[in-house]
């Protein structure tokens, strides 16, 4: 006897539902990429022997100050993201270019955050010796995974309307906690210095 | 799959990251060997980073046994430390310079001691006071504050103080001006005055003022200027150095 052809098709959604059939790849690919990015960063930070020092920028007293200000810049643009997202979704009155504002402030925030993350992973690594440090390490890796997911989700159309705001909010929340556990701590400990 | 923008954003971030990483790997050793005075830590870094960049496996570094325990052989940095005892009753501050250390133990009410001694290259110290008190401590480099400028700049001292039959464990973190250890000795209206202040990292102060051998709670020191009013006179406390 051969396999009953109906047995296979019964596992799939019935044809009537095809117009709203979920395509797992749409969610799976961003989710898998996000997990891979976060885990890869964490593993690199854990395995790589932290060097302790790295580049510094002229005019700044320490790399900690450089990073704190870069992170603060990123957080500022992330807040622009929040406001412009409300504009794009029509929850706030906004100009016609609010979409462009959202895109470019996001890009800028991301690009500013990359050197900070590189320094973190290169010079300090993934550390867990304090609660603050643990959460910062964990969420720092999570952030770039979540951001990758957000970027990849943007490319899909016909997503549930709530998905992008949720993921975007997750990215913003993560970045805020990362900032609180690093730059704010730095400014409180060493003063608002450059 | 129509919008290339998000992918380009990710790609740009990746490029920036890879560029910074290779820039760091390429320049890191040059910068440290030319500019910074810390020599021994850099030799370990130089011996490790080429291996790390050349091959992802960390095993090659194991062929040279000295690097791994070498942070302890680096010269002890000149630095100030301050913190409280584990039972929160007292404070301890230390100033290290050129392999010597001065420490001050103070409970802010009656008990105090100034201790002095040598710091060995592996970061341990045994300081003694004239009253027979003893401080044993160890610098734990790269602990307490994230390795911003790791073992060279940061660290904390864990140790114990034995004074008047009491045994106090303490943890002292690195200080940054104006926190630290201050001392003022003077003669005010014919009375010998000796004051010690520990200005903790959060700005709190623990201090004692001894007039002709009689200890009392010290008036608040202005950490910015070091001035302190004592019996109507302005004294200036100096940062204590060994």
Image: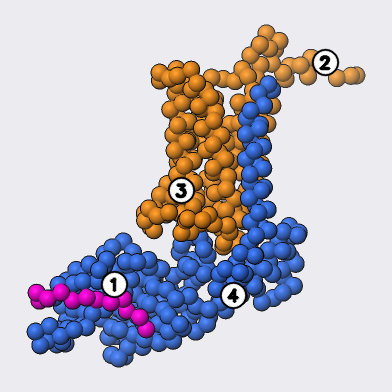
Chain A drawing hue: orange
Residue at 45% across, 21% down:
A87
Which one is closest to the eye, mark 4 or mark 2? Answer: 4
C-alpha gap between disc 4 and disc 2? 75 Å
Q: Is A124 or B46 nearer to us in this picture?
A: B46
At which x and y percent is residue B26?
Answer: 68, 58
In magenta, the rendered stretch is: B231-242
Secondary structure under the numbered disc 4 in the rendered image: loop
Tell me the subunit letter for badge 2: A
To the question of a shared chain for discs 3 and 1, the answer is: no
Using the rendered image of the protein, determine whether residue A43 is visible from the camera's viewpoint.
no
C-alpha gap between disc 1 and disc 2? 83 Å
Residue at 48% across, 17% down:
A96
* Mark earlier in primary sequence (1, 4): 4
Q: Is B202 or A42 nearer to us in this picture?
A: B202
Which one is closest to the eye, mark 1 or mark 4? Answer: 4
Rendered image quadrant of residue A4? top right
Q: Name the residue under label 4.
A: B39
Label annotation for residue B198: 1
To the question of a shared chain for discs 3 and 4, the answer is: no
Secondary structure under the numbered disc 1 in the rendered image: strand
Q: Which chain is blue?
A: B
Label annotation for residue A5: 2
C-alpha gap between disc 3 and disc 2? 63 Å
């Amino acid at each position: 006897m051969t396999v009953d052809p109906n047995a296979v098709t019964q596992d799939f959604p019935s044809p009537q539902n095809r117009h709203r059939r979920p395509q797992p790849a749409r969610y799976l690919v961003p989710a898998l990429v996000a997990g891979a990015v976060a885990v890869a960063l964490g593993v690199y930070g854990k395995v790589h022997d932290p060097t302790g020092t790295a580049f510094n920028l002229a005019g700044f007293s320490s790399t900690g100050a450089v990073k704190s200000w870069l992170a603060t810049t990123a957080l500022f643009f992330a807040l622009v993201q929040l406001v412009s997202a409300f504009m794009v979704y029509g929850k706030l009155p906004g100009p016609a270019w609010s979409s462009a504002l959202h895109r470019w402030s996001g890009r800028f925030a991301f690009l500013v955050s990359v050197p900070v993350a590189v320094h973190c992973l290169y010079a300090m690594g993934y550390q867990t010796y304090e609660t603050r440090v643990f959460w910062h390490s964990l969420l720092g890796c999570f952030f770039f995974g979540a951001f990758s997911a957000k970027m990849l989700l943007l490319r899909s159309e016909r997503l549930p309307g709530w998905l992008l705001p949720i993921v975007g909010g997750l990215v913003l929340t993560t970045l805020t906690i990362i900032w609180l556990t690093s730059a704010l701590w730095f400014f409180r400990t060493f003063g608002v210095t450059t | 799959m129509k919008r290339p923008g998000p992918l380009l954003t990710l790609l740009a971030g990746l490029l920036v990251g890879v560029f910074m990483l290779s820039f760091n790997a390429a320049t890191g050793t040059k910068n440290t060997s030319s500019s910074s005075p810390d020599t021994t830590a850099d030799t370990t870094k130089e011996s490790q980073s080429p291996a790390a960049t050349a091959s992802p496996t960390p095993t090659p570094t194991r062929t040279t046994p000295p690097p791994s325990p070498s942070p302890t052989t680096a010269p002890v940095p000149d630095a100030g430390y301050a913190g409280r005892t584990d039972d929160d009753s007292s404070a301890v501050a230390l100033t290290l310079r050129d392999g010597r250390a001065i420490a001050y133990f103070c409970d802010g009410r009656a008990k105090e001691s100034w201790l002095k001694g040598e710091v060995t290259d592996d970061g341990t110290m045994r300081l003694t006071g004239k009253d027979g008190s003893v401080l044993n401590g160890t610098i734990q480099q790269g602990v307490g504050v994230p390795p911003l400028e790791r073992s060279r700049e940061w660290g904390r001292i864990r140790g114990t103080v034995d004074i008047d039959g009491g045994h106090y464990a303490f943890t002292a973190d690195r200080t940054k001006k104006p926190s630290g250890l201050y001392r003022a000795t003077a003669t005010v209206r014919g009375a010998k005055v000796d004051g010690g202040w520990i200005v903790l990292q959060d700005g709190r102060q623990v201090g004692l003022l001894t007039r002709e051998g009689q200890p009392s709670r010290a008036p608040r020191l202005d950490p910015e200027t070091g001035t302190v009013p004592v019996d109507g006179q302005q004294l200036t406390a100096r940062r204590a150095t060994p």
